[in-house]
Image (spheres, grey):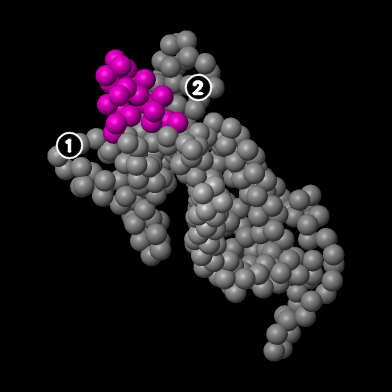
Amino acid sequence: MRRSANKRKMTLMQRKALMGYLFVMPFIIGFLTFFVYPLINSFIFSINRIELIEGGYRLIPILFANYYYALFVHPNFTRMLIESIQHMGQSIPSVVIFSLFAANILNQKFRGRFVARSIFFLPVILTSGIILAVERNDMLQNMVSIMADPESGIGGGLAQMGLGFRAVLMQSGLPQQLVLFVVAAIDQIYGIIVASGVQILVFLAGLQTIPPSLYEASNIEGATGWDNFWKITFPMISPLILVNTLYSVIDNFTHPDNQAMQLIRETSFIRIDYGLSATFAWIYFVAIFIILAIVMWIVSKAVFYQE
């Protein structure tokens, strides 16, 4: 009997493993088919100087001269890379916190819930492809940016309001780092909402998988909504916090408005310096990989996996 049970158990484990392999197989095939060759080719470009000749190009080996130039000589790349990392560190916590907050609200039962969920997902559609380009060239949007300029009269008034709000928070006795975080989040509220559509859907799907019986048992024991959130909701949804954090980091680093991404495109397609552009891309890729590893190591410590 034990042997038959073990065989059944092994068979079930083998089925799960097979399903996992089949699930990742399209990604593996696509990676090997479409990404391996460009990756290898881009690294070859980064250690060569490319000269365009009739009918193609010629590679002149220079080893890691492009990497030295990018890190220690180029006037903007290192600064843009550091600024991108700093912007990521400021925006990602706001995006994840807002997404979780919005998903909790949208998970409640109220009239017009479907419309509200659609509204929160609209920024994902409106900031994709040609619509994003139209938004960038929108005259009204440019006027709003001009109005928000501190050098203008209206912008100066807004800046004074922001300084006043910051002064009120500072006098409240809150830690200075928390005050700076809240003020920065308020200044970037439009960008936070635009970047939170996918994360809200992921959190919302996770919230709907939590068994209602857990909340019913907790309410019988006299737990408050605050207790339910920290004792049930947060632990059960913590794996998705890790997923959304990693997704937000990648989305932030690959956003079209990212300065480092703009520099890479400009170097490649405007200055026609493919070798230096590939060097920028590889340094940027390594930086993103290291940051993802650090973020995953930190956030995974708070993740709760239900067995």
Question: Is there CB contact under 8 Å for labels 1 and 2?
Answer: no
Does residue 19 belong to the magenta stretch?
A: no
Upstream in sequence: badge 1 or badge 2: 1
For disc 1, the marked residue is 110
- Which numbered disc, 1 or 2, marks the residue closer to the eye? 1
Q: CA distance from mark 1 to mark 2?
A: 33 Å
For image coordinates 41% across by 15% down, the residue present is 168
Magenta portion: prevailing SS class: helix
From the viewer's perspective, tell me whether residue 198 is left or right of residue 56. Answer: left
On the image, the x and y values in percent for residue 93 come to 49, 35
Amino acid type shown at disc 2: Leu
Amino acid type shown at disc 1: Phe
Does residue 218 belong to the magenta stretch?
A: yes
The magenta segment is 212-235
Displayed quadrant of residue 228: top left
For image coordinates 64% across by 44% down, the residue present is 293
Residue situated in front as seen by the camera: 147 or 39: 39
Q: In the image as oriented, which residue stretches furthest toward the bottom?
A: 55
Displayed quadrant of residue 132: bottom left
Q: In the image as oriented, which residue stretches furthest toward the right?
A: 62
Q: Secondary structure at mark 1?
A: loop
